Amino acid sequence: MRQAVQWRLLLENPADGVKVSQQPRNEMQALTVEQARTLLKIALTTPYGPVLAVALTTGMRPSEYLGLKWQDIDWGRQTISVVRSIRRLNGRWWFSDTKRARSRRPIRLQSWIVALLRELQTQTSAISSCPEAVHLLFRTPRGEPINVDSLAKHFKAILKQACLPELRLYDLRHTAATVALAVGVSPKVVSEQLGHASTAFTLDTYAHVLPHMQDEAVARVEAALLGKGIRNI
């Protein structure tokens, strides 16, 4: 509406003064490091292990990692580029740009994930009945793109098998961020990995991790000032 006013298609913005009701946020849940390790152990015994491992270690959105193609991997630098998302609409698969410009980003992969993807690549057939899926990293056993709702059902079954709390598939993104912050990864690095608009947004979203980070920061500064092994001045 504001743009239409600037283009002089409207004399005034009819939405001015409208109060938008506050939308409730979905409750955020995340696995602990130990729970995440248990999840991986069970998930990697299933056909959906690789895709869930990538989700858990990169913090990508489901629409982003399900739209990854082999050409997005830089094997030498061990990075993967998020440049598109995938969705199913009216019975067809559609590729589109990422959520926002900042969402286009390279993500450094853990070494074991690189090895896992190389193994997956050797097992992936270059033939598919679905043209949209030919170059995708993650496909169904029939060679089609993975539907996010179907993956969510398999994810819940794996959680149940592992005796873990019930989470949404999207909560793997929160788990990736929470675990990274909890072990001391810079909030700026986490923000860039998630494709957030700013580091401030990341810190606001994951404020529950900050007390742990502050405890560790205080301990490190204290050790630096007093010297190793010194307890009293």
Image (tube, rainbow, N blue to C red):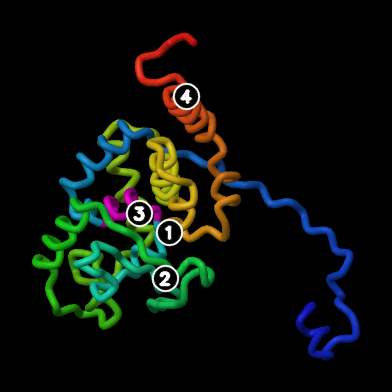
Q: Distance from label 4 to label 3 (Cα)?
A: 35 Å
Q: For the residues carrying marks 3 and 2, which lies nearer the camera in this image? A: 3
Question: Residue 71, can we see it?
Answer: yes
- Can residue 86 be seen by looking at this rendering? no
**Against 44, is 123 above or below?**
below
Specify the amino acid type for callout 3: Thr
Report the side of 195 relative to 52 (left or right). right
Judging depth in this view, the residue of 228 and 176 nearest the camera is 228
Q: Nearer the viewer, residue 97 or 73?
A: 73
Q: Disc 3 marks which residue?
A: 58
Residue 114, percent across and down? 19, 58
Q: Which mark is residue 85?
A: 2
Residue at image mark 4: 225
Residue 136 vertical position relative to residue 107 in the rendered view, above or below: below
* Amino acid type for the residue under numbered disc 1: Arg
Q: Give yes or no for contact between labels 3 and 2 (Cβ–Cβ under 8 Å).
A: no
Element assignment for label 3: helix
**Magenta-colored segment: predominant secondary structure:** helix
Across and down, in percent, residue 173 comes to: 42, 50
Q: Earlier in the sequence, mark 3 or mark 2?
A: 3
- Identify which residue is drawn at 31% across, 58% down: 108
Residue 61 occupies which quadrant of the picture? bottom left
* For marks 2 and 4 on the same chain, the one whose residue lies earlier in the sequence: 2
Tell me which residue sits at (41%, 64%) in the image.
Answer: 63
The residue mark sitting in front, 1 or 4, is 4
> How many angstroms separate mark 2 from mark 1 (CA)?
9 Å
Question: Magenta region: which residues?
Answer: 51-59
